[in-house]
Image (cartoon, rainbow, N blue to C red):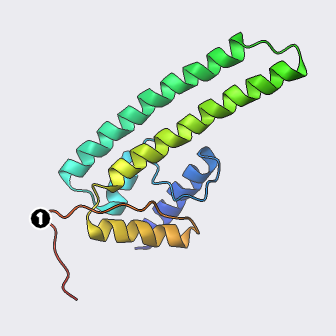
Amino acid sequence: MKKYKFLVWSAFILVGVRVNSQADCVLGVGITNDSIISEIFQLNEMQKEKLTSFSAELKYRNDVLNNELRNVKERHPQGSETELRQLAEKYKNVMDSMGKVQTMIDKRMLTLFNPKQYELYQSLCKEAYRSPYIIVPSVYTDSIVDKN
């Protein structure tokens, strides 16, 4: 279990740095290595496939948004204070979009978690003093139900 805690803390630290230290508990799909998420949450084959797909989708969407950031920086006039404020606002809007995309992808992945995986996610969020995303976990026919 110590190995998992170390990996999770590493993932949360990495995510916190790259996603502007939000109070939300970011799962980090597309940011954290897929194998780390897969190992920590013991994903089944379908979940692993979806994780790979979601990671690729996030990369594509962020590439588009990064392109937009470059265009804003290169094409927006920066000669006056007003123009610089407008540039900052456009930049902020694109960065906010990146955060929204991350949230959307993470929530999609979390909806594929079974109750035990989601409980682990909530527990790790609590340890990291973050607010978990609220979702309804999936119930799989191959999931083991703990009656205790």
Residue sitting at x 19%, y 50%: 45
Relative to 147, is 39 above or below? Answer: above
Where residue 57 appears, x then y in whole percent? 37, 33
Numbered label tally? 1
Is residue 111 rendered to the left or right of residue 127? left
Question: Which one is in front, 94 or 50?
Answer: 94
Task: Name the residue beneath numbered marker 1.
Answer: 142
Where residue 87 appears, x then y in whole percent? 75, 23
Where residue 95 appears, x then y in whole percent? 61, 35
Mark yes or no: residue 30 visible: yes
In the picture, the quarter occupied by the C terminus is bottom left
Q: Residue furthest left?
A: 141
In the picture, the quarter occupied by the N terminus is bottom left
Is residue 27 rendered to the left or right of residue 118? right
Mark yes or no: residue 33 visible: no
Picture quadrant of residue 94? top right
Where residue 142 appears, x then y in whole percent? 11, 64
Is residue 31 rendered to the left or right of residue 115? right
Q: Residue furthest bottom?
A: 148
- The amino acid pointed to by label 1 is Asp
Determine whether the residue tagged by mark 1 lies in a helix, strand or loop. Answer: loop
Residue sitting at x 50%, y 67%: 125
Relative to 85, is 58 above or below? Answer: below
Residue sitting at x 73%, y 14%: 76
Picture quadrant of residue 70? top right
Residue sitting at x 64%, y 53%: 21
Question: Which one is in front, 49 or 69?
Answer: 69
Question: Which one is in front, 122 or 42?
Answer: 122
Q: How crowded is mark 1: few (under 14 residues within 10 Å), some or many (20 or more)?
A: few
